[in-house]
Image: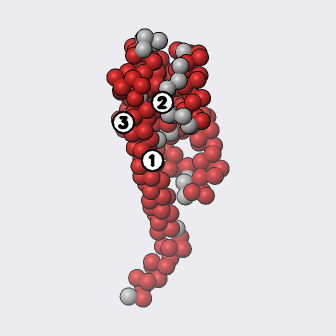
């Protein structure tokens, strides 16, 4: 059963859910949460709309969506934990990152990691990528899982319930979230650019050449 938008990715998602049911919801949300571009704004509202027809149980849809989010987040967390530090040590200098920056990130996650993961899991774009830095910063797995689940539940429930209430008009939810995603993506890119520029300025101002130049200028005055 497929109703709603007709774009290629959306039709494929609808087909998988309509064909494989609960298993598709779990696997698609797992893949989406591992930062693969599969749209949860299509998965959950469409599954919710099918629940309104009696095909699924809405509670089961929400729980499976949340479970998929947690599983996928652990995959991304594990990749960040295993690959993040070596990548930063090897390539970080090209984006003005050093090993002590990783130590600072780890300390920051020790203090504020719970709120960062919790809030990020409820935001478009950011929700799919917060697991990588959490893993790279060695955030404890139990703490990471708890706050990932707490943040993923309202996201999954909100989308599924909206689809359930709107029925055949579930695509309204997908369109609204897609627009919000575009806005958040622009904000994230600008924030990353500003962060990299700030790191560059800080590294440049702390370099020996900059210090020597500053001392020379002070001596002349």
The residue tagged 2 is 4
- Residue under label 1, please give it: 182
| Residue 79 position by quadrant | top right
- Residue 136, given in percent of the width and then of the height, sits at 54, 38
Tell me: 23 left or right of 143: right
Q: Residues within 10 Å of mark 2 (few under 14, many from 20)?
A: some
Q: Is mark 1 on a helix, strand or loop?
A: helix
Q: In terms of sequence position, does the residue under pointer 1 or pointer 2 come before the other?
A: 2
Q: Which of 10 and 23 is in front in this view?
A: 10
Residue 72, by quadrant, is top right
Question: If the image is split into quadrants, where does the C terminus sit?
Answer: bottom left
Q: Identify residue for label 3.
A: 119
Q: Residue furthest bottom?
A: 220
The colour scheme applied to this rendered structure is secondary structure
What whole-number distance in Å separates the C-alpha atoms at marks 3 and 1? 18 Å
From the image, state whether disc 3 or disc 2 is nearer to you.
Answer: 2
Residue located 42% across and 21% down the image: 48
Residue 167 can be seen, yes or no: yes
Q: Which of 141 and 212 is in front in this view?
A: 141
CA separation in Å, label 1 and label 2: 21 Å
Closer to the chain start, of discs 3 and 1, is: 3
Residue 25 drawn at (x, y percent): 52, 20
Q: What element carries label 2?
A: loop
Whether the residues at callouts 1 and 2 have beta carbons within 8 Å, the answer is no
């Amino acid at each position: 059963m497929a109703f709603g938008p007709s774009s290629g990715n959306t039709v494929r998602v609808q087909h998988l859910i309509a064909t494989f049911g609960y298993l598709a919801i779990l696997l698609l949300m797992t893949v989406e949460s591992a930062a693969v571009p599969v749209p949860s704004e299509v998965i959950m509202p469409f599954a919710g709309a099918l629940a309104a027809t009696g095909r699924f149980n809405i509670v089961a849809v929400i729980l499976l969506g949340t479970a998929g989010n947690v599983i996928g987040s652990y995959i991304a967390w594990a990749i960040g934990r295993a690959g993040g530090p070596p990548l930063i040590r090897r390539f970080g200098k090209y984006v003005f990152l050093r090993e002590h920056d990783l130590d600072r990130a780890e300390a920051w996650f020790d203090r504020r990691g719970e709120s960062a993961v919790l809030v990020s899991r409820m935001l478009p774009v950011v929700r799919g990528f917060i697991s990588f830095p959490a893993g790279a910063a060695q955030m404890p797995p139990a703490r990471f899982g708890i706050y990932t689940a707490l943040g993923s539940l309202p996201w999954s429930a909100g989308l599924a319930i909206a689809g359930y209430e709107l029925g055949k008009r579930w695509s309204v939810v997908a369109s609204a979230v897609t627009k919000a995603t575009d806005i958040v993506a622009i904000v994230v890119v600008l924030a990353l650019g500003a962060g990299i520029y700030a790191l560059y300025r800080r590294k440049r101002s702390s370099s020996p050449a900059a210090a020597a130049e500053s001392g020379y200028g002070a001596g002349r005055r």
